[in-house]
Image (cartoon, helix red, strand yellow):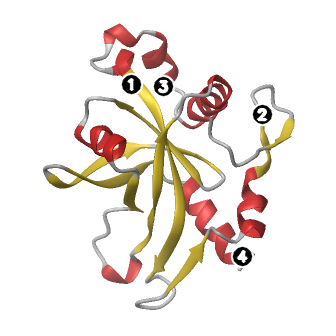
């Protein structure tokens, strides 16, 4: 099980765009967002007035997929997940996520340092997705090959949430609170 969780984690680490699906008063909505992950927690920036952010404020339940645009069905790989999202309010959590985001997207540092130069950036807030269930599809191994992971298994969750880099580069333990 840990090996499959590691494969999913590695896939998250090496991809950039997530298709986020939410549900609100006008029905279902899907939108692409850039993300960074810390363990299996997935963070993205978005203005609070976007449809998906408004939907999440009303109903935190969400689904998402992470994949590439394949021309050959035998090469399809990707993650589908469902869980809940919350608005990040913790200064410490925001700082840790910023460090990870700048490491993954160095050009974003300029954008976030000059937010008035880019539409919507000054009003953007961090959102965090906490997946409860993930499915990894890998047709490159065998057509229809897939496996699932339920993150209620604390042993798996702990493996990826403990000993992550802190802001100063030292190793820290993370707890599961999101305040």
User: What residue lies at 57% left-to-right and 38% top-to-bottom?
Assistant: 104
Q: Position of residue 168 (x, y in %)?
A: 80, 25
Q: Secondary structure at mark 3?
A: loop
The vertical placement of 159 against 105, above or below, is below
Q: Position of residue 102 (x, y in %)?
A: 58, 29
The mark nearer the N terminus, 4 or 1, is 4
Dot 2 crowding, Cα within 10 Å, few <14, some 14–19, many 20+ = some
Dot 1 crowding, Cα within 10 Å, few <14, some 14–19, many 20+ = some
Q: Secondary structure at mark 1?
A: strand
The vertical placement of 71 against 83, above or below, is below
**Which residue is nearer to you in this view: 18 or 158?**
158
Q: Nearer the viewer, mark 1 or mark 3?
A: 1
- CA–CA distance between discs 4 and 3? 33 Å
Q: Decide if residue 39 is on the left or right side of residue 115.
A: right
- CA–CA distance between discs 1 and 3? 17 Å
Check disc 3 and report the residue beneath it.
Answer: 107
Check disc 1 and report the residue beneath it.
Answer: 124
User: What residue lies at 26% left-to-right and 29% top-to-bottom?
Assistant: 49
């Amino acid at each position: 099980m840990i090996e499959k969780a590691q494969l999913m984690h590695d896939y998250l680490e090496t991809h950039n765009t997530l298709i986020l699906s939410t549900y609100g008063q006008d029905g279902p909505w899907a939108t692409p967002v850039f993300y960074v992950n810390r363990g299996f927690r997935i963070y993205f920036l978005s203005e609070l007035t976007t449809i998906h952010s408004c939907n999440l404020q009303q109903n935190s339940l969400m689904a998402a997929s992470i994949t590439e645009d394949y021309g050959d069905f035998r090469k399809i790989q990707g993650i589908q997940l469902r869980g809940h999202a919350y608005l990040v309010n913790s200064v410490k959590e925001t700082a840790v996520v910023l460090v990870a985001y700048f490491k993954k997207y160095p050009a974003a540092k300029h954008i976030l340092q000059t937010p008035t130069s880019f539409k919507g950036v000054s009003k953007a807030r961090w959102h965090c997705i906490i997946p409860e269930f993930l499915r990894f599809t890998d047709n490159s191994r065998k057509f229809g090959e897939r496996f699932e992971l339920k993150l209620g298994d604390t042993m798996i969750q702990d493996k990826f949430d403990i000993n992550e880099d802190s802001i100063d580069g030292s190793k820290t333990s993370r707890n599961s609170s999101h305040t």
